[in-house]
Amino acid sequence: MGDGVYISKNMNSDQIGFIQLLKENEIEYFTIDDIQDRLGQNYENINEVLENLVKKKFLVRLQRKYYADINFNNSFVIGTFICKNSAVGYWSALSHYGLTERFPNTVYIQTVNKKSDKALLGVSYKFINIKPEKRAGIVKSGYGNNQFFITDIEKTLTDCFDLPKNSGGFDILIPAFQRADINAEKLIGYAKLINNIAATKRMGYLAELFNKTKLRKFTAYAKSIVNERYNVIDPSGSDEGEFENKWKLRLNVSKEKIFNIANTEY
């Protein structure tokens, strides 16, 4: 609460009028910097109005200058609203696209900005910082006040293989990759963008193992960049298992187990 802000015992005309304007304009979240332009009203006492409405539980303060209706609870919208140049990604995006039935307890937000993880309204948010040149494949989802930005399916999978710790783990990522309807051209483009040979080899190997015929062009590309260094198929596992020479991968998870994992959820 700002210093010197007067908190009234009851709702006054400014507070009532502000809530009415929000409802009339169907505004459920906003910043101080843009609210007066959106409402076409000039509030000299905007901080006092907002602090009173937060205190009286009509609004919730998301962070400095960022507010939302107390009943608004779309975590994907909130996560991308409080962080500029961001999008829902990784495990959260896998869940959104129906590629896993395991719903994460954390909302994963990809952003080109540095932002600390935080909890809001009982939801934990993890902000993953990426280089601006890796920002791609961003699409809009939802309607009206429930619209948010999210990585498309191909970029989501590529990002998960690039940073698998944000995917929920091998036993979530593998079924998602096997189930997804993937565009080969997009996957090639995103693989080039992230420039992670190990991740591309893993995707290429799995595409071939699962006989994903639509990904033959991607598989050919992945084979073309295979280097001499061996990488384990599951980066979170130990350095052991059968060597897959064609892909320069070490199967610390056997082929049989990969198939079992791929069919576990479905």
Image (cartoon, rainbow, N blue to C red):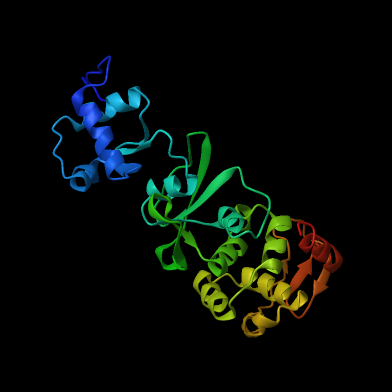
Residue 164 picture quarter:
bottom right
Side (left or right) of 147 relative to 209: left
Examine the rendered structure and indicate whether residue 20 appears above or below residue 204.
above
Examine the rendered structure and indicate whether residue 210 appears above or below residue 234.
below
Q: Which quadrant holds the N terminus?
A: top left
Side (left or right) of 23 relative to 205: left
Residue 182 in the image: state x and y as whole percent: 61, 74
Residue 19 in the image: state x and y as whole percent: 28, 33
Task: Write the residue at 34% across / 27% down.
Answer: 54
Residue 125 in the image: state x and y as whole percent: 50, 43
Task: Write the residue at 67% across / 62% down.
Answer: 176
Examine the rendered structure and indicate whether residue 132 appears above or below residue 55.
below
Depth check, front residue: 35 or 228 = 35
Task: Write the residue at 48% across / 49% down.
Answer: 76
Side (left or right) of 120 relative to 180: left
Depth check, front residue: 171 or 194 = 171
Give the tally of numbered discs.
0
Depth check, front residue: 217 or 10 = 10
Task: Write the residue at 80% across / 64% down.
Answer: 258
Residue 157 picture quarter:
bottom right
